[in-house]
Image (cartoon, rainbow, N blue to C red):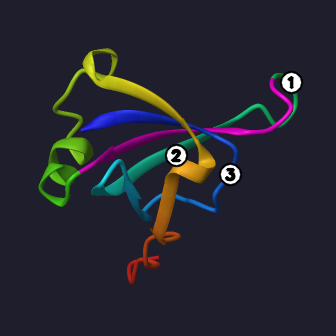
C-alpha cells in the first residue's frame, strides 16, 4: 500500500483501478486538493494498493505516515476503471 499524489485529474475516483509504473493498483481512497486555493490545477491524493491489501485499508491496520509517498503527473497514470461499482446496500 502507498500514497500517490497525482498532479492533474485523470478522471479517477474511489474504487477505481489504475496502471502506474508497470503495475496495476486498486484505489482505496481519493482526496482532491487545490480546487479553491493552491496550485493552478487539482491534485489527487490517493491511497493505492493491491487487491489483497483492501481489508488492511478498511480495518485501518496501517500507519498512514509510514506509507511510501510518490508524486506523478496525470499523464503517467492509466485509468483502467474510473470508479468502483455502486454498493447494493445503498
Mark 1 or mark 2, which has the lower sequence index? 2
Kindly check if marks 2 and 3 are in contact, taking CB atoms under 8 A apart as contact: no
Residue 82 rendering spot, x and y as whole percentages: 53, 70
Q: Nearer the viewer, mark 2 or mark 3?
A: 3
Residue at 24 percent of width and 35 percent of height: 60
Secondary element at tag 1: loop
Work out how far the residue at label 2 is from the one at label 3, CA to CA, in angstroms.
11 Å
Secondary element at tag 2: strand
Image disc number at residue 30: 2
> Between residues 85 and 75, which one lies in front from this camera angle?
75
Secondary structure predominantly adopted by residues drawn in magenta: strand
Residue 69 rendering spot, x and y as whole percentages: 38, 24
Residue 80 rendering spot, x and y as whole percentages: 44, 72
* Residue identifier under label 1: 37
* Residue identifier under label 3: 9
Q: Which residues are magenta?
A: 39-49
Amino acid at each position: 500500500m502507498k500514497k500517490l499524489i497525482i498532479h492533474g485529474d485523470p478522471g479517477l475516483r474511489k474504487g477505481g483501478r489504475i496502471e502506474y509504473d508497470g503495475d496495476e493498483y486498486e484505489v482505496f481512497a481519493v482526496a482532491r486538493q487545490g480546487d479553491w486555493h493552491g496550485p493552478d490545477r487539482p491534485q489527487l491524493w490517493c491511497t493505492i494498493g493491491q487487491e489483497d491489501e483492501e481489508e488492511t485499508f478498511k480495518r485501518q491496520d496501517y500507519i498512514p505516515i509510514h506509507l511510501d509517498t510518490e508524486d506523478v503527473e496525470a499523464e503517467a497514470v492509466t485509468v483502467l476503471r474510473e470508479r468502483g461499482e455502486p454498493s447494493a446496500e445503498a
